[in-house]
Every structure is written in structure tokens, then in C-alpha cells.
Amino acid sequence: MKLLQFLRHGKQCIGAQVRGNSILDLTSASSKIPNNVVDLLARGENALNLTKRLTETNSESLISYDDVKVLSPITNCEKVICVGMNYKDHCAELNIPIPTEPVIFNKFPSSIIGDKGDVVIPKASSSVDWEVELAVVVGKEGKHIEESKAMEYVAGYTVALDVSARDWFGEKNSGQWLLGKTFDTFCPLGPTLVTKDEIADPHDLPLACTVDGQVMQSSNTNQLVFSIETCIAWISRIFTLKPGDVLLTGTPPGVGAMRSPPLFLKHGDTVVSEIDEIGKITNSVVDE
Ligand code: MG
């Protein structure tokens, strides 16, 4: 199932993407379906099963994807957790040793935008970079989750662009990464939440990022240093994972900062972030 959120007549709804580019409005189809995916996940397996049944039995009144304002499939989660330096080939590009334990940072959920949303280059930065990433969406609450049971806590996957203001990574803010990672619009996420039953192996998915048609990143999630299970076990020792929490699993090589000369996003660019079997998001870049 591919779940998404969209605005219809000014109201937010959950939809299921069916038959390619069509959307079934699940919120209108049943009073038991809330208007956002985080609340749907919080209602547990029964609610998710209901969306599946509705998707299988309702074939009327489909809406075209292009006729509605599509939002990110997750907009009101509690946490956006990120893993840094989590691709073997990216560590080689950075010329750093492969980390021995996950490197965790975060973005604020307020930085999330959806497919076709604009990435805004803040006045405060002149080195805004791209990082395509596999995003994992948490399906149920858990703390101290065992690695062997971690997948039970996964609802599904989506595509993320971990936009990064590199000039905020060094001396500014005493080297803390948070601010450089969480300017408004710095977390494009979508287009849909693909439920985990649709993905045979999340650790073997080609992913790529293109800027104005030029392929900047091209790798495979088989390059992950720490698996999804390891990351979930690791972070759930620190804090409770909640339904709808998003985990960005790290980026492969090809980021702008490591190019010679360095290359950064500019007004008018179009960034396409894509993961096989999950989907792609397209975001225009504009100046603040
Ligand atoms: Mg990243």
C-alpha cells in the first residue's frame, strides 16, 4: 500500500495511491480513517488493515495525483531522527573511518515538506547541499527494542532529501549539526509511505539524486554501515520511538561539498530524489 496525504477542498485527507497516478480518498471513504497518517499509525494494525480493505474494495471516485495538493505522507510526527556517515562508500568519499557505532542527529518535524514543495535557500547560508536518503517510518511505540524484533516496529518507507547548510557545520553553533540540518524546508519527504510488506529487501534498493538532470548521487542501500534494525535498537535505548517517527538512514557519496570544486544548490535548480520501488520526489530550489 502506498499511503499519502493531500489537501482536498482545503481539508487534509489520507489517500492511497492506486493504479499508477490515481488517489483513493480514504478519509472520505470511512469515518474510521483520520485525516493524517501519524494518527492512523497510532491507531494500530486494525486501522491499517481497514485502509487496505478500503483500497481493495473501492474503485470509484478516484482523484488524479496531479489535481490535488500533495503533502508529505508524514507531517506531524514527534521526531525526525537522522543517521550520519552511514554509507560505506560515503565514508570513503569523506576519507573517514567507518563509524563503530551509529552517529545520530536530528531535524525538527517543522522542516518537512512534500513532493513538489520548494526547498528554500536561507539568507544565512551559501552552501546548501543535497543528500538523498531512505527514510524509515515507525509503526508502533517502543523502547529498548531488540534488533531481532526491530522490523515489527517499522510501518514502511519513503524517500527523503536531507538538505544541509554546510557552512553551519563547522565553527558556527560550536560545530553542532542541528541548525545546519533543520532550516525550514530542509526535509523533503515522500511522495508516499510505502508499507513494509511491499518492499522485499530495504537493504538492497538503488537510490539516486539528480540536480537539474545531472546525476549527483547513485548508490544502493546495500552500502549501509548500520542496518535499519541496528539503528532502531540503538536509538530506542535513548528515547521511546513513537508511531510516525521518521528515521533518515544516511546518504551515499556524491554530495556537493565533496566535489571539486564544491557545488551547492542555487535558485532555479530542480532536485529529484529517487529510490527504486519506493518512489521519487521532485523539489524546486528558491532563494529566501
Ligand atoms: Mg544525511
Image (cartoon, rainbow, N blue to C red):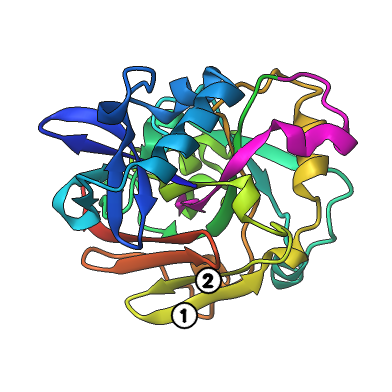
- Res. 25 in view: yes
**Residue 111 appears at what percent x and percent y?**
39, 36
Quadrant of the rendered structure where residue 71 is? top left
Q: Is residue 264 left or right of residue 107?
A: left
Q: How many marks?
A: 2
Element type where label 2 sits in the image: strand
The Cα atoms of the two marked residues, 1 and 2, are separated by 7 Å
- Can residue 187 be seen here? no
Q: Residue at x 57, y 56 (%)?
A: 133
**Residue type, label 1:** Val
Asked if residue 242 is positioned above or below residue 155 in the image, the reply reads above
Question: What segment is highlighted magenta in the picture?
Answer: 142-164
Question: Which of the two residues, 94 or 190, is positioned nearer the viewer here?
Answer: 190
Neighbourhood count class around disc 1 (C-alpha, 10 Å): few under 14, some 14–19, many 20 upward: few
Residue furthest out toward the front: 57
Q: Residue at x 45, y 20 (%)?
A: 39
Q: Which residue is mark 1?
A: 215
Q: Is 260 included in the stretch rendered in magenta?
A: no
Q: Position of residue 160 (x, y in %)?
A: 49, 51
Please name the amino acid that badge 2 sits on: Ala
| Mark 1 CB within 8 Å of ligand 1 | no
CB atoms of marks 1 and 2 within 8 Å: yes
Which mark is drawn over residue 208? Answer: 2
User: Residue most toward the left?
Assistant: 9
Q: Earlier in the sequence, mark 1 or mark 2?
A: 2
The residue depicted at 88 percent of the width and 30 percent of the height is 146
Considering depth in this image, is 69 or 273 the residue closer to the camera? 69
Check disc 1 and report its element: helix, strand or loop: strand
Q: Where does residue 90 sit, x and y in percent of width and height?
A: 69, 66
